[in-house]
Amino acid sequence: MNEELQFILDSTKESMNGALAHLENELLNIRAGKANPVMLKSVMVDYYGTQTPLSQVANVNTPDGRTLTIQPWEKAMLTEIEKGIMIANIGFNPMNNGESIIINVPPLTEERRRDLAKMAKVEAENAKVSVRSARKEANQEIKKSESSEDEQKNCEIDVQTSTDNFIQKIDSILAAKEKEIMTV
């Protein structure tokens, strides 16, 4: 296989890997009922007039599967962190005990679990669309290349094989996430 076709194949796999990484990142945001510090990733806190991510002003831990504790590095930040959590509108009710903030993560209802599973399916479908569009772009580039017809056909087969492999990976990631979401 010539260098041009190998480059097309490599860049296609790279963009498919990007779609897979994006899917995994998006699925981290879909909570499955267990407390996880990632749940508070979107919380911004007013730190002396500057909007700052919560992770830069406090330590977030999970002592058990249903509780998040937030230990600010400065005691004065307790009320600001509470405000930030309320403004983020992520459905949590923070409790301030004077030293830290404790959040009890409520168990998910069956309806909410189904909604989260649907959200996961949508993210997986978006990833599949990205993989397929990478395949389409690769096939267009292959046709434009100045290689022999046989080399072009072989490269298209390689692109299709990569596409099938990535779709299969996406399906297995989705199945694992759905199982995690639906497990009570």
Image (cartoon, rainbow, N blue to C red):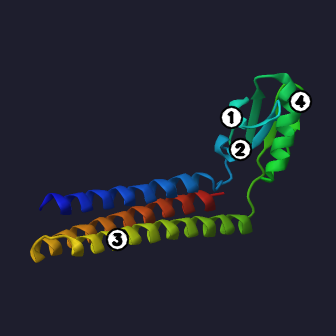
Residue displayed at 39% across by 56% down: 17
Residue 91 in the image: state x and y as whole percent: 80, 53
Amino acid, disc 2: Leu
**Image quadrant assignment for residue 96:** top right
Q: Could you tell me which secondary element the residue under label 1 belongs to?
A: helix
What mark, if any, has residue 55 been given in the picture? 1
What mark, if any, has residue 137 been given in the picture? 3
Closer to the chain start, of discs 3 and 1, is 1
Vertical arrangement, residue 165 with respect to residue 56, above or below:
below
**CB atoms at circles 2 and 4 under 8 Å apart?**
no
Disc 2 versus disc 4: distance between alpha carbons?
19 Å
Vertical arrangement, residue 66 with respect to residue 132, above or below:
above
> Is 15 in front, or is 70?
15
State which quarter of the image contains the N terminus. bottom left
> Is 24 in front, or is 156?
156
* Mark 4 surroundings: few (<14), some (14-19) or many (≥20) residues within 10 A: few
Which residue in the protein does label 4 denote? 97
Closer to the chain start, of discs 2 and 3, is 2
Which residue in the protein does label 2 denote? 40
Closer to the chain start, of discs 2 and 4, is 2
* Mark 2 surroundings: few (<14), some (14-19) or many (≥20) residues within 10 A: many
Q: Could you tell me which secondary element the residue under label 2 belongs to?
A: helix
**CB atoms at circles 1 and 2 under 8 Å apart?**
yes
Left or right of residue 30: residue 126: left
> Is 176 in front, or is 81?
81
Amino acid, disc 4: Asn
From the image, state whether disc 2 or disc 4 is nearer to you: 2
What mark, if any, has residue 35 been given in the picture? none
Closer to the chain start, of discs 1 and 2, is 2
